[in-house]
């Protein structure tokens, strides 16, 4: 029983992953093994962020939390979906469809992301860039082992 439930959850998580990847707008940062969950970040945050996407998805009845990462990577934000036993393939397809609607709507709106001030070495931007690169390499290296 439990094995079949988890296999079904993993298959639905895979379908959801594929649908989100097809949008071309997100980078999947969670691993494909372990728990049936999906964590993903916007590739381009110059105009909108994952918090806006999370808020907009609520209008469609979805609760998709947006989080910032822990210390030393808090400038990275992700959306997270946990695929439960009652999350069917058709729900995965509907969520991807609603996500595409949200992205289209946000594209038509003015940016809510503040325009950044030109970075200087004094503001630590050089360090933040190094941390981001390190974190992304670590995620890519560990994508297939353990859980997110």
Image (cartoon, rainbow, N blue to C red):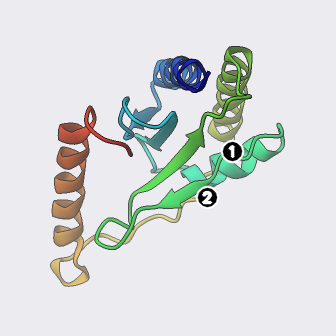
- In the rendered image, the residue lying farthest to the bottom is 122
Looking at the image, residue 66 lies above or below residue 126: above
Helix, strand or loop at mark 2: loop
Badge 1, how many Cα within 10 Å: few under 14, some, many 20+? Answer: few
Name the disc covering residue 109, or none. 1
Name the disc covering residue 2, or none. none
Q: Is residue 96 left or right of residue 32?
A: right
Give the image location of residue 91, x and y in percent. 73, 22
Give the image location of residue 90, x and y in percent. 73, 15
- Residue marked by disc 2: 112
Q: Is residue 22 left or right of residue 130?
A: right
Badge 2, how many Cα within 10 Å: few under 14, some, many 20+? Answer: few
* Residue drawn 45% across the image and 34% down it: 26
Relative to the observer, which residue lies in front, 103 or 144? Answer: 144
* Residue drawn 21% across the image and 76% down it: 120
Helix, strand or loop at mark 1: loop
* Residue drawn 37% across the image and 41% down it: 29
Relative to the observer, which residue lies in front, 92 or 129? Answer: 92
Looking at the image, residue 17 lies above or below residue 122: above
* Callouts 1 and 2 close, C-beta under 8 Å: yes
Give the image location of residue 7, x and y in percent. 52, 19
- Which of the 4 image quadrants contains residue 31? top left
Between the residue at mark 1 and the residue at mark 2, the CA separation in whole angstroms equals 9 Å
Screen quadrant of the N terminus: top right
* Residue drawn 34% across the image and 73% down it: 71
Looking at the image, residue 72 lies above or below residue 49: below
Relative to the observer, which residue lies in front, 47 or 83? Answer: 83
Give the image location of residue 134, x and y in percent. 16, 55
């Amino acid at each position: 029983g439990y094995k079949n439930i988890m296999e079904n959850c993993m298959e639905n998580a895979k379908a959801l992953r594929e649908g989100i990847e097809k949008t071309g707008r997100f980078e999947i940062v969670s691993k494909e093994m372990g728990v049936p969950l999906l964590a993903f970040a916007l590739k381009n945050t110059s105009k909108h962020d994952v918090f806006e996407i999370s808020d907009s998805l609520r209008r469609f009845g979805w609760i998709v939390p947006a989080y910032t990462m822990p210390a030393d990577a808090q400038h990275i934000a992700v959306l997270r979906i946990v695929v439960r036993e009652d999350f069917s393939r058709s729900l995965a397809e509907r969520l991807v469809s609603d996500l595409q609607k949200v992205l289209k709507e946000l594209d038509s709106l003015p940016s809510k992301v503040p325009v950044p001030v030109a970075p200087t070495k004094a503001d630590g931007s050089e360090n933040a860039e190094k941390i981001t690169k390190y974190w992304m390499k670590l995620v890519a290296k560990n994508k297939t082992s353990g859980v997110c």
